[in-house]
């Protein structure tokens, strides 16, 4: 089983024995956006080829990749980066030339490396479908950034010979989630220690009661 790390510090299982599943994440439809983008790109290529049979599709794809707002990596079967588009400068602070030939695992946050290596192995044996994931990477300035996206195994495609990884920086969103969870935890800690009964009602249903309120309600029912 593969586990997908979420920014809540939890894991979701992925059954690697079957076709890779599309797993929704807090990024709100990123997988759908990537799939739609791929379909539009393919349609554009076919349309251009129809107008000019001699046209070089490789040049067209390279132009799209280099101008994509998303960061795109291609890594070989050992995890070595063989391609990175220009967006990596904005997202991680490196130029493509600085990364080509280096291990992709060197970019991972230290705590994320073991899981990343396990997920990578499962990705290279999964020959069909797009594999969603979320992980933390190290910026050139030493900070950690949060990314999510999809990987597509094209190791058997001689034109690519690698795992194509499309990712998007979701650091701001992830940190907002962390701040919200911290705020909720702070409230819960204070409420549980309160000498007053505290409760939250939503749609005529109790959504939260602290220990003091529960104890008082129990005594009133006796």
Image (cartoon, helix red, strand yellow):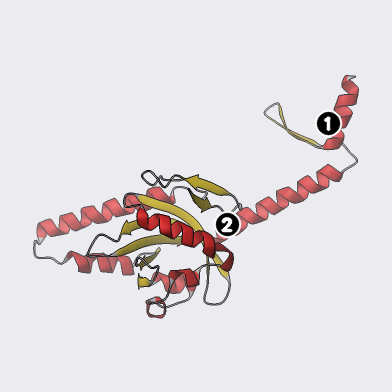
Q: In this view, does 52 lie to the left or right of 81?
A: left
**Residue at the spot 50% in from the left edge and 48% down from the top edge:** 25
Q: Is mark 2 on a helix, strand or loop?
A: helix
Q: Where is residue 48 in the image (x, y as percent from the top left)?
A: 16, 59
Q: Do the residues labelled 2 and 1 touch (CB within 8 Å)?
A: no
In the image, residue 193 above or below residue 202? below
Assess disc 2: are there few (<14), some (14-19) or many (≥20) residues with their C-alpha within 10 Å of its C-alpha. some
Q: Can residue 146 be seen in this view?
A: no
125 and 180: which is toward the camera: 125
Q: Is mark 1 on a helix, strand or loop?
A: helix
In the image, residue 161 above or below residue 27? below
**Residue at the spot 87% in from the left edge and 31% down from the top edge:** 215
Mark nearer the N terminus (2 vs 1): 2
Q: Is residue 193 visible?
A: yes
Q: How many labels does the image show?
A: 2
**Residue at the spot 23% in from the left edge and 54% down from the top edge:** 42
Residue 214: image tag: 1
Q: Mark 2 points at which residue?
A: 174
Assess disc 1: are there few (<14), some (14-19) or many (≥20) residues with their C-alpha within 10 Å of its C-alpha. some
């Amino acid at each position: 089983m593969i586990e997908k790390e979420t920014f809540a510090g939890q894991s979701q299982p992925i059954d690697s024995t079957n076709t890779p599943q599309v797993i929704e994440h807090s990024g709100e439809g990123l997988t759908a956006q990537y799939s739609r983008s791929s379909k539009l790109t393919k349609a554009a290529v076919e349309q251009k080829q129809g107008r000019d049979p001699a046209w070089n599709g490789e040049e067209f794809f390279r132009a799209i990749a280099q101008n994509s707002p998303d960061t795109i990596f291609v890594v070989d079967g050992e995890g070595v980066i063989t391609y990175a588009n220009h967006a990596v400068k904005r997202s991680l602070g490196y130029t493509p030339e600085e990364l080509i030939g280096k291990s992709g695992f060197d970019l991972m946050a230290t705590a994320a490396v073991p899981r990343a290596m396990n997920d990578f192995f499962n990705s290279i044996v999964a020959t069909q479908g797009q594999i969603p994931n979320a992980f933390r990477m190290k910026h050139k300035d030493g900070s950690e950034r949060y990314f999510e996206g999809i990987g597509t195994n094209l190791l058997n495609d001689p034109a690519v010979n690698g795992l194509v990884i499309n990712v998007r920086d979701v650091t701001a969103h992830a940190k907002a989630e962390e701040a919200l969870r911290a705020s909720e935890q702070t409230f819960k800690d204070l409420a549980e220690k309160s000498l007053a009964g505290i409760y939250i009602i939503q749609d005529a249903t109790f959504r939260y009661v602290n220990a003091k309120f529960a104890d008082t309600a129990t005594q009133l029912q006796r």
